[in-house]
Image (cartoon, rainbow, N blue to C red):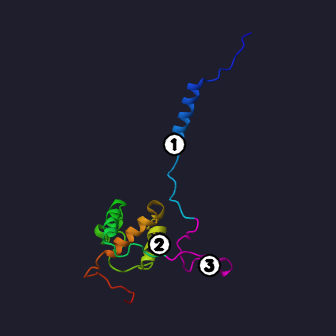
Amino acid sequence: MAVRTMRRPGVAGLAATLLAAAGLDACTQQAAPPAVSANAAPPAIAYEAHLAAGGIVPTGSTLRNPHAGDAAIAKNGALLFTTMNCDGCHGTDASGFVGPNLGAGRWRYGGADAEVFTSIYYGRPRGMPAFGGALGSEGVWSLVTYIRSLPVPGVLPTESWEQP
C-alpha cells in the first residue's frame, strides 16, 4: 500500500504563487473614481420630474463655472472637445451636425453655465451621453468654458423661439 504525502510549496513556490495572484488581481482592478470631499454637496439639479419626500428638497451646491472667461481653459476645452469626439455629433468647432450647434445660443435644457454643465455631466435623453464619470467636474467645466467662448454665428438658418 502506497502512502501519499502532501508536499508544501517552498518559499520560492509560495512567493511565485502570491506574485501571480497579485498580477491577476491588478489586471482586474479598475481605476478608483475621483475622490469627493465628505463635506461637498453633489451638484444640485431641480426640475419638475423630481419628487421630494415630504416636500423637503435635498441640499446641494450652487453650480458656478470656476473658469468663466478664461481663454487658456477654453483652449484646453477645445482640445478636450476634439479628444472626446464631441465633434462627431456637434460638428467641427461645435457648429452643429447630428447634435445641435453649440455656439448658436439656443438651448433645449437652458444655456446658463450650470445648465450646460448639467447636460454634459449627467447627459440628456435621446442622444447626449453622460460624461461626468469619464471627465469629472474639472473636465466638464473646461468644456463649458470652451462652449461659452464660441462666437455666435452671424446668420442662423432658423429663429430662436426664446426671447432674448
In the rendered structure, which amino acid carries the disc numbered 2?
Thr
Say what secondary structure mark 3 lies in. loop
- Give how far across and how far down residue 103 sits, in percent: 32, 76
- Give how far across and how far down residue 159 sits, in percent: 33, 85
Q: Main secondary structure of the magenta part?
A: loop
The residues bearing labels 3 and 2 have C-alpha atoms spaced at a distance of 18 Å
Q: Indicate which disc, 1 or 3, sits on the residue closer to the N terminus.
A: 1
Instruction: Please say whether residue 97 is visible from this viewpoint.
Output: no
**Quarter placement of the N terminus:** top right
In the rendered structure, which amino acid carries the disc numbered 1?
Ala
The residue shown at (57%, 77%) is 49
- Give how far across and how far down residue 79 sits, in percent: 32, 63
The residues bearing labels 2 and 1 have C-alpha atoms spaced at a distance of 34 Å
- Give how far across and how far down residue 151 sits, in percent: 28, 77
Say what secondary structure mark 1 lies in. helix
| 71 vs 44, nearest the viewer | 71
Foreground: disc 2 or disc 1 = 1
Say what secondary structure mark 2 lies in. helix
Instruction: Please say whether residue 81 is visible from this viewpoint.
Output: yes
Give the class, few, some or many, for how many residues have Cα within 10 Å of label 1's Cα (few <14, many ≥20). Answer: few
Per the rendering, the mark at residue 118 is: 2
Look at the image and give the residue range highlighted in magenta.
38-62
In-image side of 115 versus 102 (left or right): right
Residue 4, quarter of picture: top right
The residue beneath circle 3 is: 57
The residue beneath circle 1 is: 26
Is residue 136 part of the magenta span, yes or no?
no
Per the rendering, the mark at residue 52 is: none
In the rendered structure, which amino acid carries the disc numbered 3?
Val
The residue shown at (59%, 25%) is 11
Give the class, few, some or many, for how many residues have Cα within 10 Å of label 3's Cα (few <14, many ≥20). Answer: few
